[in-house]
Amino acid sequence: MSSNEIDINVVDFVPGRWGDPADPMHLSDSVTGALSMLGITEQAPAPVALALPSPRLDSNALTAFSATGASVTTDDEVRAARLRGFSTPDLLKFRAGDGSDAPDAVVTPSTADQVAAVLAVCDEQGIGLSPFAGGTTVTGGLVPDRSRPVISLDLRDLTGLLHLDETSQIATFASGTRLPDAERLLGEHGFELGHFPQSYEGATIGGCAVTRSAGQSSVGYGRFDDMVVGLTIATPRGVAEIGTAPKSAAGPDLRQLFLGSEGAFGVVTRVRVRVHPTPSVRRFYGWHFPDFAAGTTAMRALAQSNIKPTVLRLSDEAETGLNLANPSAAGSANGPVGGCLMIVGFEGDAADVDCRDAYISARLNELGGAALGTEPGEHWREGRFRGPYLRDPLLDAGALVETLETVTFWSNLDRLKADVTAAVTGALGDQGTPAVVMCHISHVYPTGASLYFTVIAKSLTDPVAQWAEAKSAANAAIRAAGASITHHHAVGTDHQAAYLEEIGDVQQTALRAVKSALDPNGVLNPGILLP
Amino acid sequence: MSSNEIDINVVDFVPGRWGDPADPMHLSDSVTGALSMLGITEQAPAPVALALPSPRLDSNALTAFSATGASVTTDDEVRAARLRGFSTPDLLKFRAGDGSDAPDAVVTPSTADQVAAVLAVCDEQGIGLSPFAGGTTVTGGLVPDRSRPVISLDLRDLTGLLHLDETSQIATFASGTRLPDAERLLGEHGFELGHFPQSYEGATIGGCAVTRSAGQSSVGYGRFDDMVVGLTIATPRGVAEIGTAPKSAAGPDLRQLFLGSEGAFGVVTRVRVRVHPTPSVRRFYGWHFPDFAAGTTAMRALAQSNIKPTVLRLSDEAETGLNLANPSAAGSANGPVGGCLMIVGFEGDAADVDCRDAYISARLNELGGAALGTEPGEHWREGRFRGPYLRDPLLDAGALVETLETVTFWSNLDRLKADVTAAVTGALGDQGTPAVVMCHISHVYPTGASLYFTVIAKSLTDPVAQWAEAKSAANAAIRAAGASITHHHAVGTDHQAAYLEEIGDVQQTALRAVKSALDPNGVLNPGILLP
């Protein structure tokens, strides 16, 4: 692949394993060796057959859904393919044969009008509705309350580039469009979205909107919630077109009320997003810093500068040591020994990239960085969606592996990293399973940054319960440090308790009022975001 | 003044005339000459004495307010000083002696706890409350519904820099802090806010938050709603602390629900905002473009670039011809004849400014610009808060002069400019008062830009009714073009009808739900934002 192309690989994620089933990853000898140091020597038990609950919808409801023109099925295989998401507990439950969260039916509309019609049926009959698009949630966003029947509203037939305004650099997509499809369609016109979350191969435009996704080029192109110019949302109270202008003083910015609403306020059917011309130059470097503190200081200096790169990422000593920034070579030590690896990427035309590169390289030198050239940067770029592929072979090998993330202001970052690391290692160590906790910064702002943790320990016989202890300790540490419970993984069900505590009573009152007003019968993603 | 200092001039705006009463502007002979071409030869009648309605609060209410510790008065002079804002109709009503919108009392708390206590009294007794800070609204934001008694809650004693996090570059201000005071306080620590709306001399931190203000350096430092990291808001349901992190995926971004809420959802008492080190270099240039189309294309190219200046502004041919970018020399033609003037400003340290300046100057040359050097840029910078000072002498001279603004996407900008210009000239021409309509772009985004219009015509005997026709026609043109009714002047009462149409039923339902939940007795700024 030449250096100015984007990876375009649409993957049909299916429950049970992350990513492309045709292209799994295998553990290197060095990773296997590292696992044995954590006492991980026994393979996990083989997955057992999935047991699904019987569908609970009567023929009246199924007929009403069919009458909308959407396709409707209660087939077990289809329901299983809409079961939960891709957190480690989700994968573990799947392996254990637990299909208890499956929807009662899968309804697949092919137009926005059909979405509205399906929503009307749900509203009339009091049937819960869980929007499904990429299915890549890692926070329980696809586990709606099943106290009444619930359908999976599969949005993946709502796909395509509906409009491109080349002058304003705005593309309108159907919400179920997968990110690689979006890039392919824009590429035909010389444009690019540039939104690359690690779930890129499976995630959709609508899913990124309702979960406030952040991509690896967030420094250059912004988070997804920055990129969204407008939304079309179907609600039980009618369809809303939100977003009149780039920015406005016409009251609250209600785009930001629906972005992050995780389907609780309506179903997004169309998204207008900012795009940019396909960069003619993409240049990615590695930089070495003696330790995380020096690297963090440099990250902050760049984040607070007027001139920024497109991609900026810093691995801590543990992550650098395990070479996780280059998943294909994970565990091998082929970089500088010790210290921290920073990835600095530029995309644009030649004059723009040359200008920013010269300025930023000079600053990084001043800040104590040592240039490693483009090889580590290009390795990172090539492997950047592969990291999560390592999880399945690690689980197979008897490891418990999971990630979590948070965000805070710069002055609080050291404390947050130390506290979360201590909480997770403490909670796992207390169970007799010492953990390796690695961390990176991959999204920066003038006022702060995110922290992304990867945790590996030996799996116990009930790894779901084992991880729940660690996650609970991490959430408590995040709350105690005053940080946000999630930077880009969203609330779902897993973060709900911490989220409600984070926003407090007045904000909860405001959100519940919106929910009650737009969804009086509570059919939209019941139990997600708000209890 | 040296080129790296900021103007710091706190002005106690008082109703009736804009800005610093000690430093009024006078019309040059060339302006007077231009007015005569519009048939403006007769002076406006002298202002008449202001007639205020009697205060309607009983001693029970006044005693309850006093018991909070806030100072309370029903004095006519104080009430008159909290009367309306600074739109041209506001000034004209003042001149005509119309004090009918005056509050029944002025209550001035000096702590956030007193704000909450005053709010509780209002909630219990059903008394309306109109927060007052800088008082510089130009859209009727200080004309609450008077169908029941209403107090002006004067926030100007809530002032000061409460906290500065130099690492995270975040300052916490009491909401009544005036912008020049904020800059002075930050300057003592080597920091700057960099928010320069034209109302800078009188506006407050809290006012900028609730109206989504945009400053002249918005390209470099963002709009005020971009700069706000957190808010403390007193509501009848309790106090909310909003904003945990720079950005988060923890549900909707509720900062953006309260920013722009114009006091309808609560009273902002503290604001945490992003700041930056005081720039060591400030460099402002003039550039000449042959026409507005060429200048707009260049503005768009810079707005869509990865490397941006700090200030960017383009006057159309009419505004360039009248030299409005240099108010002290308005009407004199000392620039290039014809074409359009662009102001391009850079602020930062020397390496940063040199880097951006070189890149952007090269681009502007490629885009057909002709460099005019720093003189026009420095003239603009020195006079940048003086433009509105011209309005009072123009009104005195018998002119009707007012501004309005809007925002849309780039592909719609030409149509919007043409349609608004035609609507305003048509509505005034139909009344026998041909108008000069000038325009500039002063806020740009990758996807679009604002348009700011200045209108001058001969005043009729009822100039309020005369302007109402023009404003109504402009609003209709803005709505028909699909643009937003306001880019940075907010909704107030003047834009309410167009605003409600702009957001539509579903969004209105959501906002009304929030209003009812947080302010069940409807005491917060009754009639503002929502009817």
Image (cartoon, coloured by chain):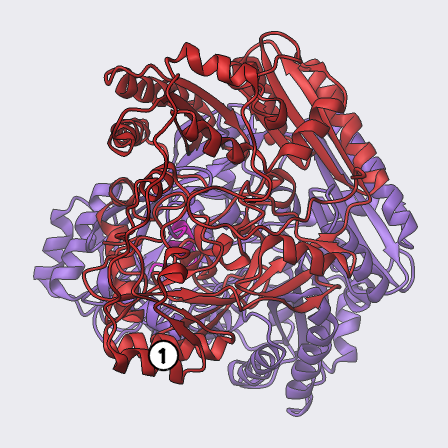
Chain colours: A purple, B red
Q: Is residue B166 above or below residue A462?
A: above
Q: Which residue is mark 1?
A: B65
Q: Which residues are magenta?
A: A252-263
In terms of image quadrants, where is residue B238? bottom left
Where residue B365 sits in the image (x, y, percent)? 72, 15
Where residue B294 sits in the image (x, y, percent)? 57, 13
User: What is the three-letter code of the residue carrying label 1?
Assistant: Phe
Which image quadrant: the N terminus of chain B? top right
Q: Is residue B432 above or below residue B55?
A: above
A262 in the magenta segment = yes
Q: Residue at x 31, y 28 (%)?
A: B474
Where residue A266 sits in the image (x, y, percent)? 29, 55
Q: Residue at x 36, y 74 (%)?
A: B119
Left or right: residue B68 compared with residue A429: left
Q: Say which chain tag 1 marks.
A: B
Residue placed most toward the observer, A415 or B418 = B418
Residue placed most toward the observer, B23 or B370 = B23
Q: Could you tell me if residue A497 is visible in this image?
A: no
B35 in the magenta segment = no
Disc 1 residue crowd, few under 14, some 14–19, many 20+, Cα 10 Å: many
Q: Residue at x 81, y 37 (%)?
A: A357
Left or right: residue B466 compared with residue A453: left
Looking at the magenta stretch, what is its main secondary structure? loop
Residue placed most toward the observer, A98 or A236 = A236
In terms of image quadrants, where is residue A493? bottom left
Q: Could you tell me if residue A109 is visible in this image?
A: yes
Q: Residue at x 33, y 30 (%)?
A: B478
